Amino acid sequence: MKTVIPFGPQHPVLPEPFHVKLHMEGETIEGLDLQVGYCHRGLERIFQTDYKKVTFLIERICGICSFLHTLGYVRAVEEIMELTVPRRALIIRTIMAELERIHSHLLIIGLYGDALGYENYFMQSWRDRELVMELLEYISGNRVNYAMNQVGGVRRDLDEDRVKAAHKAIDELEKRTGDISKVLLNDVSIKLRTQGIAKLSKEDAIALGTVGPVARASGVAYDVRNTGYLIYPELNFKPIWETAGDNYARMQVRIRELFESYRMVREALKLLETEGSGEIMLAIKPNQRPNGQAFVRTEAPRGECFHYVKANGTPDLERVRVRTPTYANIYALTKMLPGADLADLPVAVVTIDPCLSCTDR
Amino acid sequence: MLTMLKNAILNLVKPSATINYPFTPIPSAKEARGALKIDGPLCIFCGLCSKACPAQAIQVSRADKHWEVDPYQCVNCGACVDVCPKKCLGFEEKYTAAAQKKSNVEFNG
Amino acid sequence: MRTEETKKENLVAQAYEMKKEGWRLVCITGTDLSTDSEQKMEVLYHFARENEVRHLRVETDGTENYPSILSAYANALFLENELKEMLGIPVDGIKGELLLRLEDEVKAPLKRLRGVSYETREIKVEKNAEVAPQ
């Protein structure tokens, strides 16, 4: 029997609102219509203001990848203004970007456990996430919207105490992630519910333009950190990818990325210690204003994030365009879900790590 | 199995994980950006903080010698602290306490 | 950032060619460049292949029919919907109701009205506007 089931915009499994109209044949999903845009805030219009204020406004696109939004934006403005950012600022930016990836991945691992009906797992994962949140607060001064970046560098330095605290937190996190990942990767009942379900083939992943862990789980070894921004080339960064393309592979990629991030944060912290203190912020004259346009790609926790800035020599920007990873990934649901059961839908939705406030802006 | 047992026994003897707020204050990180504060007598009412504020939370009137911030509109970014020529703006480490009424922080010189 | 000028008549053929060469569509950016005397919009197509990037630039006045590259790139659906909803460019075959659900309040919020700045623009709410079909 054919039925149409509305899923969302408000649904217990969705942290943010989007609507899916499911075309069902019995218990099996045959097709779906997507509808996003429930949290549109008109931010791209608000960004047509003073370029220094936009740094603080753009991180409010999303609470989880807020540092990555400022990073992409300041990289674009620095490219327009032809500024060379001090090396110490680049190292601090790399550390912050990786810490944010850790906190985002631990968050989605917890939500994934919750979607599977394993609420204890959710609590464990979020308890561990608290360690990195506290570290981020200690480094930047704020728990969520860090206000760390500004055009020309970073606003706070990492002193000796903070480096020590970061080393301690990363060691503890690595131990705890080892514990929780054992359950996620080896448990038989979790494997039965995730392996081979909601598959995305490599061809579809390329055709639909998916990015980040969703693409990498389908065998597309595409990671923007490979293009060599910040100090990633020095940290010997290698993209992590799997070939299965199912729910299990997508979370496997995230867990392996966590360990890669721990390693990179450690190495970057060591660089900070060995190179000693230095400048972290360039002085920008008040009459120095951006004029031109720039296109910048940054790897956010969820995938490739795109920023385009167009300025015309006045302090006010002409256009800021943001294309977030979920914007590219959410459409892949239309290829992933047909053939899956209705009960698999929440898990499949969580594995693409949807962030709707990013998508709608 | 044994890890679970260890956790269960530890949870029995550990002190409570929650804080008895508001009687016990919430611990905040060192140099956290909790709430904006002004060291009044130093202020010259130049209005630079008001111009730099991305959230339009600060109002300054040079004629009336009046400075005012709406703490509920403030986004704790610290842009005003960076531009202040007299360094009279700063942040308290403690977050704003829960209140029954919304009121602005004002200063008259 | 270097952009390549192209005409909208050639756009679809060029998109097919780029797809064959292995470029992936990253984003479509529409900007309203209208002044008081002239209506002008630019649409930028950003493509990437590994570490290389390419940008196609198309100019339009925002009222004539505009070609869609959906047949070449499936992920252009959301991007072209946004082009229609935010700037009001009539893209072929795109309904423009995927992102904004504000049909009866705001139309094309990023479009400049000639002679009217953003701030003074009045938002008209038509009470008895046609109801969207279910």
Image (tube, grey):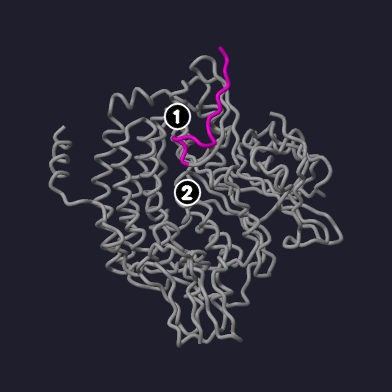
Q: Mark 2 falls on what kind of element? A: strand
Taking the spot 40% from the left edge, 47% from the top edge, the residue there is A104
Return the x and y of residue C1 as percentages of the image width and height.
64, 57
Taking the spot 48% from the left edge, 65% from the top edge, the residue there is B102
The answer to which of C33 and A43 lies nearer the viewer is: A43
Q: Of the residues shown, which amino acid type is indicated by label 2?
A: Ala
The answer to which of B90 and A73 lies nearer the viewer is: B90
**Disc 2 target residue:** A300
Quick one: which residue is furthest to the front in this view? Answer: B100
Return the x and y of residue C60 as percentages of the image width and height.
80, 48
Label 1 crowd (10 A; few <14 / some 14-19 / many >=20): many
Magenta region's main secondary structure?
loop
The answer to which of A300 and B33 lies nearer the viewer is: B33
Rendered image: mark on residue C101: none
Relative horizontal placement of residue A230, taking residue C91 as reference (left or right): left
Q: Mark 1 falls on what kind of element? A: loop
| Chain letter for the residue marked with disc 2 in the picture | A
Q: In the rendered structure, which disc, 2 or 1, sits on the residue that comes first in sequence?
A: 1
The answer to which of C117 and A225 lies nearer the viewer is: C117
Magenta stretch containing residue A11, yes or no? yes
Label 2 crowd (10 A; few <14 / some 14-19 / many >=20): many
| Chain letter for the residue marked with disc 1 in the picture | A
Taking the spot 68% from the left edge, 40% from the top edge, the residue there is C81
Return the x and y of residue B23 as percentages of the image width and height.
27, 62
Report the magenta residues as a range. A1-15
The image quadrant where one finds the N terminus of chain A is top right
**Disc 1 target residue:** A245
Q: Of the residues shown, which amino acid type is indicated by label 1?
A: Gly
Quick one: which residue is furthest to the top in this view? Answer: A1
- Whether marks 2 and 1 lie on the same chain: yes
> Where is residue A207, by image quadrant?
top right
- For the residues labelled 2 and 1, the Cα–Cα distance comes to 20 Å
